[in-house]
Image (cartoon, rainbow, N blue to C red):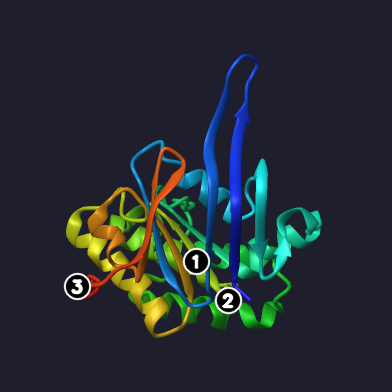
């Protein structure tokens, strides 16, 4: 059973006078443990697709199954649990609380989880170590570099133990070297820890860090192919 199954998926936005169809008949699967990039130019529909896969938006037509269950068959409570426990989100803009420490930002999702409070400290410290930020654990995030902010956001996405990480343009606000270090983090999550990674990007160079690329153009799949020569982000974390 595929982790994600999409069949003839469509998404249309309805305005007062304008109807805009963003996704048109998409069909694909993503298996547990895959590292897949969804690539396309601005306006191709990749972020809209991410929102549907991440239960942030409903499809207009077609079928979307997560772990075998159709989107529309999930209750609101089930969707909330999936978003909090099974899926982690990393966004281009980091979405951190700038006056809070790295520890406090990473701990935040635990406040809304079912994990016992006695586990929180270890969970937070473990994921901060995974992304190489133990030396910054008590720093306010406003004092971090861009790459450190994004790695803090990745740690926050990991803290509830999700199996899937959605990364939406995670290198978009970073210089090339710092972006490489962020991609190294994502590759480690996949290669060493077995996370399913779905990467949204408009950059071919970034997309090629995945094992497979789904290319969108005008809301349709132009290609869906394995990446033969995967790029490796061999940049060490800055201590």
| Residue at point 77%, 62% (across, down) | 78
* Residue receiving disc 1: 165
- Label 3 element class: loop
Name the one closer to the observer, 184 or 221.
Answer: 221
Q: CA distance from mark 3 to mark 2?
A: 25 Å
Circle 1 SS class? strand
Q: Picture quarter containing residue 161?
A: bottom right
Q: Nearer the viewer, mark 3 or mark 1?
A: 1
Q: Nearer the viewer, residue 4 or 85?
A: 4
Quick one: which residue is furthest to the top in this view?
17
Q: Determine whether the residue tagged by mark 2 lies in a helix, strand or loop.
A: loop
Please identify the quarter of the rendering in which residue 146 is found.
Answer: bottom left
Q: Is residue 28 visible?
A: yes
Q: Kindly indicate whether the residue at mark 1 contacts the one at mark 3 (C-beta within 8 angstroms).
A: no
Mark 1 nearby-residue class (10 Å; few <14, some 14–19, many ≥20): many
Residue 39, given in percent of the width and then of the height, sits at 36, 52
Point 23% across, 64% down: residue: 180
Indicate which label's residue lies in the foreground, 2 or 1: 1
Residue under pointer 3: 235
Asked if residue 15 is positioned above or below residue 64 in the image, the reply reads: above
Q: CA distance from mark 2 to mark 1?
A: 10 Å
Q: Looking at the figure, which quarter contains the N terminus?
A: bottom right
Q: Pointer 2 and pointer 1: residues touching (CB < 8 Å)?
A: no
Disc number at residue 161? 2
Which circle's residue, 3 or 2, is located before the other in the chain?
2
């Amino acid at each position: 059973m595929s982790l994600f199954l999409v069949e003839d998926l469509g998404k249309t936005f309805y305005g007062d006078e304008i109807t805009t169809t963003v996704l048109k008949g998409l069909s694909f699967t993503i298996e547990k443990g895959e590292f897949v990039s969804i690539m396309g130019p601005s306006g191709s529909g990749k972020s809209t697709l991410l929102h549907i896969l991440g239960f942030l938006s409903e499809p207009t037509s077609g079928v979307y199954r997560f772990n075998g269950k159709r989107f529309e068959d999930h209750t609101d409570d089930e969707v909330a649990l999936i978003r909090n426990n099974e899926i982690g989100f990393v966004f281009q803009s980091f979405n951190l609380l700038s006056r809070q420490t790295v520890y406090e930002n990473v701990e935040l999702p635990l406040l809304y989880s079912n994990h016992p409070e006695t586990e929180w400290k270890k969970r937070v410290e473990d994921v901060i170590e995974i992304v190489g930020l133990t030396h910054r654990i008590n720093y306010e995030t406003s004092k971090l570099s861009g790459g450190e902010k994004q790695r803090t956001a990745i740690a926050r996405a990991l803290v509830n133990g999700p199996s899937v990480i959605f990364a939406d343009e995670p290198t978009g606000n970073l210089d090339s070297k710092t972006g490489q270090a962020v991609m190294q983090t994502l590759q480690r999550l996949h290669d060493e820890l077995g996370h399913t990674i779905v990467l949204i990007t408009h950059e071919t160079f970034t997309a090629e860090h995945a094992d497979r690329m789904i290319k969108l153009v005008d809301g349709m799949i132009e290609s869906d192919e394995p990446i033969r020569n995967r790029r490796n982000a061999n940049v060490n974390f800055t201590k």
